[in-house]
Amino acid sequence: MLSTKDLARIALFAALIAALGLIPKFDLPFTAGVPITAQTLGVMLAGLILGPRNGLLAVLLFLFVVALGAPVLSGGRGGLGVFFGPTLGFLAGWVLGAWMCGAVFFWLVRHWPGRIFFSALLAAILGGILAVYALGIPTLAWIANMPVDKAALVSLVFVPGDLIKAFVAAWITQRLRRVGLRSA
């Protein structure tokens, strides 16, 4: 059962992911329609701060709002059409990624309580990058009708920015923990 506090935090992080969509996206001609956005940062933060279940629920709420047609994806995109394009796997990967960020982070914190930044960074890389790519790359290959190795190569352009987002998410998580924010 979700408490009122949980529901408020889930809605807040869904809104944060939407707000990060206001930062302009970058489209590159060789990425087959998958833009570079800041929204993965919100996905990482949802998992790291809310935990696996509530982080996943925040992303699902956000994607539900997208499906309803709200133009909250970067570049003002929204509606069911985005779930039939090359971004489908990455959007689905956000759900897995938020859950994995939270699960890995909370497991690491239990075993190494003094290593908040390192734990958050590792969780953000495993969940916010690897898990998202694990669904995004094969789906991109399928939808764009390209070999998986080429889709993986195309996706390398996202790695530097995603690593920066992982560092930022780890730093924010560490700072919030220092001021006493505890979740999940």
Image (tube, grey):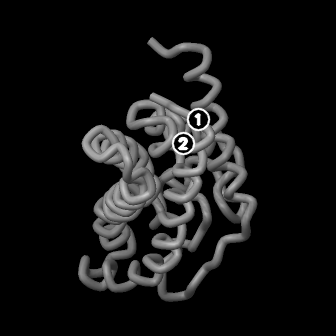
Res. 138 image quadrant: bottom left
Q: Is residue 183 above or below residue 101?
A: above
* Number of the label disc, if any, that sits on residue 180: 1
* Number of the label disc, if any, that sits on residue 177: 2
How dense is the environment of label 2, judged by Cα within 10 Å: few (below 14), some, or many (20 and up)?
some
Residue at image point 45% right, 43% down: 47
Res. 143 image quadrant: bottom left
Estimate the x, y position of residue 68 in percent, counting from the top left.
Answer: 63, 38
Estimate the x, y position of residue 161 in percent, counting from the top left.
Answer: 52, 75
Disc 2 and disc 1 in contact, CB within 8 angstroms? yes
Q: Is residue 148 left or right of residue 79?
A: left
* Number of the label disc, if any, that sits on residue 108: none
The secondary structure type at the circle numbered 1 is: loop
Residue nearest the observer in this picture, 124 or 80:
124
**Which quadrant, please, contains the C terminus?**
top left
How dense is the environment of label 1, judged by Cα within 10 Å: few (below 14), some, or many (20 and up)?
few
Q: Is residue 20 left or right of residue 163?
A: right
Residue at image point 39% right, 82% down: 156
Residue nearest the observer in this picture, 121 or 72:
121
Q: Label 1 sits on what residue type? A: Gly
Residue extending farthest front:
114
